[in-house]
Amino acid sequence: MTHQCIIYEKKQNIGVIKLNRPRVLNAMNRQLWLEMLEVLEAVQQDSKIKALIFTGEGRAFSSGADLKDSRDRTIEDYRIYLESLQEASRKIIRFEKPTIAAINGYALGSGYELALACDIRIAAKDALIGSPEAKVTSSVTGGAFRLVQDLVGPGKARELLFTAENITGEEAARIGLVNLAVAPEVLMDEAFKMAEKIVANSAFSLKLIKKGLLMAQGETGLEALMDYEVEACLACVSTKEREQSLTNFEQRKKE
């Protein structure tokens, strides 16, 4: 299975999906999400794989949506992109096999939301995690409105989303946004250790436990929330403010 935007590897009964656009810090485009869906389906059908790790190739987990791609999209093109993103996010949230995000470097916007969709998050202590959407006149996706609040509570979730500031992996562990923060050089070792503990257990039990946990969170309401996320994001990117926000954001990155 060959892809342009991701790398899929297997280590015994653990799968690893690496986002593979390192030149743009693994920024996400529609092609990446479509490839993700294809690989997720293959992993789902592979009875030998009992857990799945997500990480990024190079210096970042993912810097989020590829803003260069988004600048010239029509609203209808943007809707198609967002629906691909939401479909992949739903698939990960509901994935029958346990998922782990190994967060290296930047995990921003959609990259952060990919990590939120996973069952367990392990971050490098120096990772930078955040939702910059309010700075670029956008809005969050991937079920993040619920997922962030479930992890850190409504007050902290509002602080993170309203300020649009990044926090380190160490701070993310302190507030419960990630399960564990470790030295960058042992990140993948720790992710595999966690995966190995999980796959030692009954795959059938894990499947039912995960389903029960989603039911207990009121997962049935997630559909309406994620549909709202599409509309909220489209409303933001339709504004005149959006273009200036993108220009300001690019200038700040160069400073």
Image (spheres, rainbow, N blue to C red):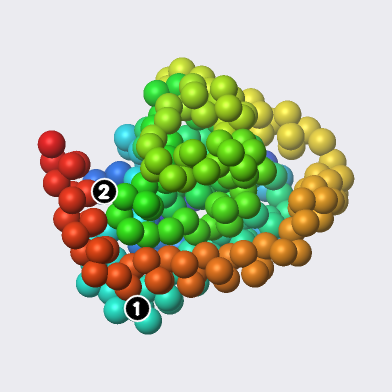
**Which residue is rendered at x = 47% and y = 39% of the image?**
160
Q: In which quadrant is the C terminus drawn?
A: top left
Q: Is residue 207 visible?
A: no
Tell me, yes or no, whether the two marked residues, 2 and 1, touch with CB atoms within 8 Å: no
Q: What is the total number of numbered labels drawn onto the structure image?
A: 2
Give x and y (percent) for residue 67: 27, 58
With respect to residue 250, does 130 lie above or below? above
How far apart marks 2 and 1 lie (CA) works out to 24 Å
Q: Closer to us: mark 2 or mark 1?
A: 1
Farthest residue to the bottom: give it.
Answer: 76
- Of callouts 2 and 1, which one flags the residue occurring earlier in the amino acid sequence? 2
133 sits to left or right of 87: left
Disc 2 marks a residue whose amino acid type is Val
Q: In the picture provided, is 227 more to the left or to the right than 134?
A: right
Q: Residue at x 66, y 34 (%)?
A: 195
Q: Nearer the viewer, residue 34 or 156?
A: 156
**55 to the left or right of 75:** right
Q: Amino acid type of disc 1?
A: Ile
Mark 2: few/some/many CA within 10 Å (<14, 14-19, 20+): some
Residue 95 location, x and y as percent?
68, 55
Task: Give the quadrant of residue 125.
Answer: top left
Residue shown at 54% from the left, 57% from the top: 142
Q: Residue 85 placed where, x, y %? A: 48, 64
Per the image, label 2 sits on a secondary structure element best described as helix
Mark number for residue 24?
Answer: 2
Would you name the residue on which mark 1 appears?
75
Place of residue 55 in the rendered image (x, y in percent of width and height, measured from the top left): 47, 40
> In the displayed structure, would residue 253 be above or below residue 74?
above
| Residue 170 visible from this viewpoint | yes
Q: Nearer the viewer, residue 28 or 46?
A: 28
Task: Give the structural element (helix, strand or loop) at label 1.
Answer: helix
